[in-house]
């Protein structure tokens, strides 16, 4: 009975060690640490990667010896516990192997606590936002941090791996006063804009800040993330006509990818705003004055895509405006 009990305890201990960590890549592991004072640390077993089982070795982290022998067990809970554990020879102090541990914070329900990225208020307070200007299969993904840090590293890829047919550029940082936004341009290979989508694109973002690890996902069809560029518009003051052209980045032919529009007129004299829904590329607003602010936005006519940003204020036809003032 004592032998059976010992075997069961050994098996339980081994299972606990396995559950304490998961492999991110070669020699890099993530420890899921429950983020409260009452939870004990995770016990992690380190094994020196050498075929010479009698070679005297020791383990070191940040210049401090953590143990001797081929196998040692360490406790990992807080960020100072994470980092690089190196196995060295006792005589020559040569590095034999290493294990690098990252920590991801989890709550009592086992859910990852995400604090490195700042969420976008729209859509749906997401951390990873992807948008497409057209149906070419090219899309942009973006995320934000509170402050730019040279120690934060990002990796974005398709969850389906090479089978997903998604390639992305390196992240580009756009620093603002309060946040830094990172963007990447991605493309789905062999994408057909005229075919119906059956499988969603699943993007996976990994974030490492020193020894803290977090990940984020976004699943979507291209049709669901369409957000056209704003149209280019012009206002002819002589007859109150506003005209505009399709965004240059929009898909063609326009007959297959039509847009619908909204025209906004902000009256400077009456301090009111009017919005007109239009399917053509012009509208007549005879009551608009030369000081009124007019802009246009667009979205896919047949699919409930996002509206574009409002265009810059429509250019005035200054020549006709001067002729009108001289009459």
Image (spheres, rainbow, N blue to C red):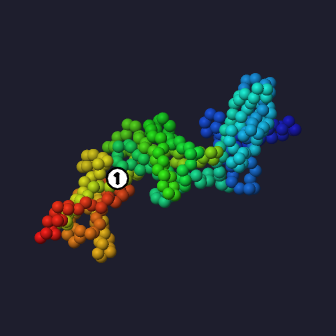
How many marks can you see?
1
Residue 207 in the image: above or below residue 318: above
Q: Quarter of the image containing the N terminus?
A: top right
Residue 46 in the image: above or below residue 178: above
Residue 280 in the image: above or below residue 56: below
In this picture, residue 326 sits left or right of residue 67: left
Residue found 56% across the figure and 45% down from its top: 150
Q: Is residue 105 visible?
A: yes
Residue found 67% across the figure and 38% down from its top: 100
Residue 233 in the image: above or below residue 75: below
Query: Which residue carries the number 1 mark?
Result: 228
Q: Is residue 219 visible?
A: no
Give the x, y percent position of residue 278. 26, 62
Of the pair 239 and 165, the residue shown nearer to us: 239
In this picture, residue 265 sits left or right of residue 130: left
Q: Secondary structure at mark 1?
A: loop
Residue found 68% across the figure and 38% down from its top: 84
In the picture, residue 235 is in which quadrant?
bottom left
Of the pair 79 and 35, the residue shown nearer to us: 79
Taking the view exactly as shown, the residue that stands out farthest to the right is 2
In the picture, residue 98 is in which quadrant?
top right
Give the x, y percent position of residue 87. 73, 32
Of the pair 230 and 64, the residue shown nearer to us: 64
Taking the view exactly as shown, the residue that stands out farthest to the bottom is 270
Residue found 72% across the figure and 40% down from its top: 62
Give the x, y percent position of residue 288. 23, 70
């Amino acid at each position: 009975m004592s032998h059976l009990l010992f075997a069961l305890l050994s098996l339980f201990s081994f299972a606990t060690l396995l559950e304490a960590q998961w492999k991110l890549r070669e020699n890099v592991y993530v420890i899921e640490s429950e983020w409260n004072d009452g939870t004990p640390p995770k016990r992690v077993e380190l094994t020196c990667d050498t075929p010479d089982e009698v070679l005297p070795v020791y383990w070191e982290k940040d210049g401090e010896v953590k143990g001797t022998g081929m196998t040692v067990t360490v406790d990992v809970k807080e960020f100072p516990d994470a980092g690089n554990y190196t196995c060295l020879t006792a005589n020559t102090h040569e590095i034999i192997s290493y294990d690098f541990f990252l920590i991801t914070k989890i709550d009592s329900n086992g859910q990852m606590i995400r604090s490195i990225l700042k969420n976008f208020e729209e859509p749906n307070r997401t951390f990873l936002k992807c948008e497409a200007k057209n149906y070419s299969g090219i899309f942009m993904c973006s995320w934000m941090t509170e402050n730019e840090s040279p120690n934060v590293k990002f990796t974005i890829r398709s969850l389906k791996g090479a089978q997903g047919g998604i390639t992305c550029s390196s992240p580009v940082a756009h620093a603002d006063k309060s946040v830094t936004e990172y963007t990447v341009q991605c493309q789905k290979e062999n994408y057909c804009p005229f075919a119906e989508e059956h499988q969603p694109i699943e993007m996976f973002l990994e974030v490492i800040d020193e020894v803290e690890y977090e990940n984020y996902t976004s699943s979507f069809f291209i049709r669901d993330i369409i957000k056209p560029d704003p149209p280019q518009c012009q206002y002819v003051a002589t007859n109150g006509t506003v005209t505009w052209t399709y965004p240059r980045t929009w898909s063609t032919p326009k007959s297959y990818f039509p847009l619908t529009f909204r025209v906004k007129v902000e009256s400077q004299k009456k301090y009111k705003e009017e919005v007109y829904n239009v399917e053509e590329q012009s509208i007549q607003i005879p009551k608009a004055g030369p000081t009124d602010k007019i802009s246009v936005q667009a979205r896919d006519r047949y699919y409930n895509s996002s509206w574009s940003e409002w265009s810059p204020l429509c250019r005035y036809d200054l020549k006709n405006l001067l002729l009108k003032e001289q009459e």
